[in-house]
Structures are given as C-alpha cells and as structure tokens.
Amino acid sequence: MSVSGTLALPADPALAAMAVALRDAGHWAEIVDRDWRLVYATDDLRRIYGGLTVLAPVAIGSHYFGPEAVRTRLDWTSGPNTLELVRELFAVFGGSILADTPAGREGLRALVDPALHDLVARLPTIEPGPALFVPWRGTHLDVPVDAFTLTVRIHDPGGRHVGTALISKPGAGMAVLATVAVGIDLRHFDRMQHVAKAARRPGAILFADLEASSPLARRLPTASYFTFVRRLARAADSCIIDAGGLVGRHVGDGVVAFFLADTAGSESAAARNCIAAARALRGALGDVATRSNLAPEDVVLRFGLHWGSMLYVGQIATSGRTEVTALGDEVNESARIEACATGGRALASKALVERLSADDAAALGLVPDRVTYTPLAELPTATEKARRDAPAIAVCEV
C-alpha cells in the first residue's frame, strides 16, 4: 500500500520502539519486518526523497524490492529513483535479504519486481549478522550522490529476530557534515527548502551594496578588506534572516534578499519585513565599522527595495554551492533603484510601499497615503541605466 502522510508506528513493540528512537533522533531510516516488508520510514528520509518539499510515498506492507516498492521509488524526486539505481541497490542489499528468505533464491525471485529477476542468481550469500554496512548511489535534485546504509537486526525481548532497521546517511563523514552544519540558521534552512522547487512566488526584493567600495578596497590591506567584507556579509545575512527573508547571492560587498508573501503570511507582511531588514542592517553598520577599525562614514550602504509580483524563485544546488535566486524584470529594476540610493538612503518603490496594510505601515512609522514619490529618472542621483531601464518607477525614502 503506497502511503503519503506521516506513518503510524509498526504494530510489533520491538519494531515500534526502534521506529520511535530513529524518528526522534532525526535519522534517515526505514524498518522492515523479518520478511523484508516495509513497515516504517521516518519523515526525515521521506522528505529527502520528496525533493525537500513533500513526504515521498512509500510502499508500506510491500516487500522492500517488490513491484509496488519499485514503482513507488521511480516516482520519487530524489533517492534511488531510476531503474538503474534500484538495480544497484538490490545488488548490494540482496544478499542480506536472501539470507532472510526461507525459500531461497526461487522464493526471493517470486517476491521481487521482474526487473530484478536476472540479479537474483548473482546475489552473494551473506550470513545474517548483527549489522552490515552498505554503500549505494542515488540522486538529490538531479545531482548524483553517494550514500551509506547501516542495517541493524532487531530482536524482541525473547531474542527472536523480528526485523531490520536501515539507517542511512549521506556519503560524507560526520566530521564533514558537522562542519557544513555549523552556523546554519535552521529558520533560513527551512525557508530554503520551501523554495527547493522553483515557482512563481510574489515577494519583496532587497538589494544592498557598499558605497565607494573601490577606494576603500584600495586603501585597506587585502586581508583587512576581506575580513571587513566577511563581517558585513554576516551582518546582512543575520538581519535578513531575523526579518523572515531569504538570502540570495552575495556579489563582492553587495547582497540580494527576498521576502516571500507565502512564507511571511501576506504581501503586506513580506513588504514590512523587507523594510525592517534594511533598517536593521543600516543599524548594524556602526558595529561592523568599529570592529573593522573604520569610521562610520566608510561603511555606507545603498538600499533598493521593490515588489516582485511575477518573481520566479527557486533554489540552485550544484556540487559547489546551494543558493536561492530569482528571475524577473523586477529583480533588475531593484538593482536600478539601489544604484540611485546614494548617500546611504533606502529607496522603496511605490509598488512595495502600497502593499503595506495600515497596521504594518504604522509599525514601520509610515503613512502611505501621505508619501510623495519621485520617478527614478527625476532623481538627481539617477544613473544612466536607471534612466534607460526603469525611468518611470516611482520611489520614496523609507
């Protein structure tokens, strides 16, 4: 039976106890009974197989490599989700399963998917043991990955074998995984999983960039300037995350962020969070300057805030990095607004400010009905690109 929601615990008390322990520890894990029928899988594992956006369905009650289980795997977004990968998985697990199949190879052949029949004759004979290490291959969001599984046999209080726990992890060692995880803000990580699948998502856009960065970079030793840029990036990320945003790309001493309506709860909340983040970052600049032995006037950011009604937002994951990015005309327009915000101003578009509800505007100390806007082309600080690409976008200081 293919199941999509969170699973109930197995009926057998020993299997249920193992399921609770693995679930509460946050492991990627599955549990099969003594006949290798799947009886449990943790949500953490299924979320990975669902591409981080949904819990992948699993074939509860079916043989681990039976026809229904194989069909179910082929519908997963990530994991061993191709027939080639399923065959490789069976080749490494099959010997253990064969040892637990009373009817031997012919009995196993009758249980598994026909696409695996030719492999049964070649399976090694593995004597049942308390644990077994199994390497295998899968995919994650279309990127090939290596993974490891530790199989642990489960016994009831009387010592009778009742099933097996399959505890999986990425191919990297725990020291590497711990290093990657250090400093991760789980709030931001959850938001990134929300956009693992790219889609149209309306939201607010924040562009911020350091003013007069080239003279500062020439004046400071390279090592000192690098340390300063790192402090600035950390401050920016902290302010964005605290305000409910998604950090986009860092380019040199600039940063892009997105505040989505569907994660903020409303368009007004997303617009409010964007403005709040810009103000918080401006307030953090004094500390960045002090820690870098710079004068406050050396650390001035330009801010461009805009609304993207047609943003196409998603996560780009490669072997080198994972980041959130967005496409749409409003992204380029945000950059044009930011370039005009000289003197450390925060310029917000009319499209953004008028998203604010009365309560959110009041919380920010703004009165949208009394704001006076100026088209970018009419600003004394308007750049050539702003006059060319976005002359009619109306902005105000926030």
Image: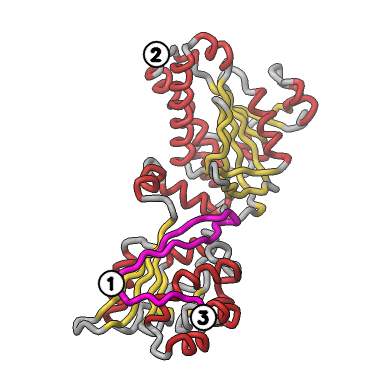
Taking the image as drawn, is residue 358 in sight? no
Give coordinates of residue 383: x percent, y percent: 72, 20
Left or right, 60 with reference to 348: left
* 231 is higher (above) or lower (below) than 299: below
Q: Which residue is mark 3?
A: 121
Between circles 1 and 2, the one closer to the viewer is: 1
Q: CA distance from mark 2 to mark 3?
A: 71 Å
* 357 is higher (above) or lower (below) than 249: below
Q: Quadrant of residue 16?
A: bottom left
Q: What main secondary structure does the magenta stretch of the protein show?
A: strand
Which residue is painted at 56% across and 43% down in the image?
323
Give coordinates of residue 312: x percent, y percent: 67, 49
**Local secondary structure at mark 2:** loop
Three-letter code, disc 2 = Asn
Q: Which mark is residue 293?
A: 2
- What span is in magenta? 122-149
Q: CA distance from mark 1 to mark 3?
A: 25 Å
